[in-house]
Amino acid sequence: MKGALTRGRLALVERLSPRALPPPNTVEVDAQAVLSALPVPVVLLDAENRFRFANQAAEQFLGVSLLQLRQMTLATLLPEDNPLFALLAQVRLHGASISDHDLTLESPRLHKRGTMVQATALLEEPGCVLLTLHDSSAARALDRQILFRGAARSVTGMSAVLAHEVKNPLSGIRGAAQLLEASVSDGDRELTVLIRDEADRIRDLVDRMEIFGEKPIERRAVNIHRVLEHVRRLASAGFAAHVKLTEVYDPSLPPAWANRDQLVQVLLNLVKNAAEAIADDPELCERGSGEIVLTTSFRHGMRLAMAGSDQRLHLPLVVTVRDNGPGIPEDIRPHLFEAFVTSKSSGSGLGLALVAKIVGDHGGLIEVDSRPGRTEFRLFLPVIIETESDAS
């Protein structure tokens, strides 16, 4: 049995060179045609880690054509201390299949996180290893969306509790402090003023929390570029005056199906965070090289059903806010959209939680990718709603 498997692997390698497909009534199928049709990235490396084969999915995954890959080694794409090289060494040593999960394949030319790699040794071709690469970033992004929306819902419930259980007795405390202020000594009057001011501060915080309440949103066709232009003007005249703002727009985009004012709030929040991150980098400030890039594009994405309706939401409209600041601290990234999570000494930690809630209310998605020198928030927004009758 083992010999049959070995001969099969050898035949696989021998058939990876281009040739005509056999007649359709034969049992044998050309291996290259089969591998090329697979939606999973497949790569064949020789003993020196040179690329001998890559299917179309692998070309897209690596961002390099097969013609170019054949002139390269794996070390051209990845630093030699990447864990993938240790995995390859183990496969060649033991002549077996080994899988590894959640690998990071990162270099100036490649940036893939959460990759599952399965490596199989071809015993009749010493040193040759067949790799399959599984990008789990989409599944991880959906998992993050569930967490983000769960965090937003928890804030929604908290805002209702605060409004009812805190705001009402707070008014009584503030009123009592005002009454005492007129009848106490000067020394005690300072304490009543302190009570009043702190009551006002807590009330303002509760007021901010109330924006998380469950309220239906009014939506209509919105030109996303007019929204971005409005945000850019506000930012350039105020908090982002020290930053270069660059626009890379796709002029052919259809209108978003959204609430204009809420989109302005979301994008202002993201641009403001980007500007503040750049301001925290002394080197960027000294050189005056801080930059925020606003990008729009069209991408065929998910089609989501609306609850209680036969209508569908399409999310092909992508808005990206990218900055070249120092990046988001690694310990904060998993909790970025949770309420009261912030790296700013004066921040409340409600801004990104509100962003997640608004995007979720629109049926959209939000993703973030951050590393030193590059932080990117991507919004996937719906376009005009299409009914089943329209789609048929």
Image (cartoon, rainbow, N blue to C red):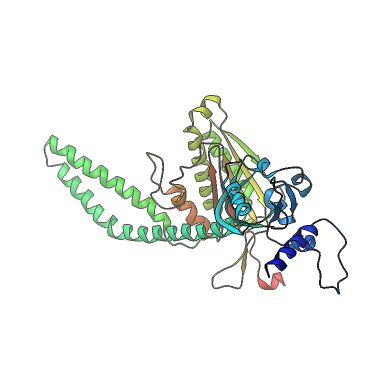
Residue at point 64% right, 54% down?
Answer: 317
Is there any visible trace of residue 218 in the rendered image?
no
Can you tell which quarter of the image residue 141 is in?
bottom right
**Percent x, y of residue 273:** 49, 41
Residue at point 26% right, 47% down?
Answer: 199
Quarter of the image with the N terminus is: bottom right
Compared across the picture, whether 347 is left or right of 306 comes to left
Residue 195 position (above or below residue 144)? above
Residue 149 position (above or below residue 112)? below
Residue at point 55% right, 61% down?
Answer: 363
**Percent x, y of residue 105:** 60, 47
In the image, 3 versus 316, the foreground residue is: 3
Can you tell which quarter of the image residue 82 is in?
top right
**Percent x, y of residue 42:** 69, 57
Is there any visible trace of residue 195 in the rendered image?
yes
**Percent x, y of residue 103:** 56, 51
In the image, 315 versus 309, the foreground residue is: 315
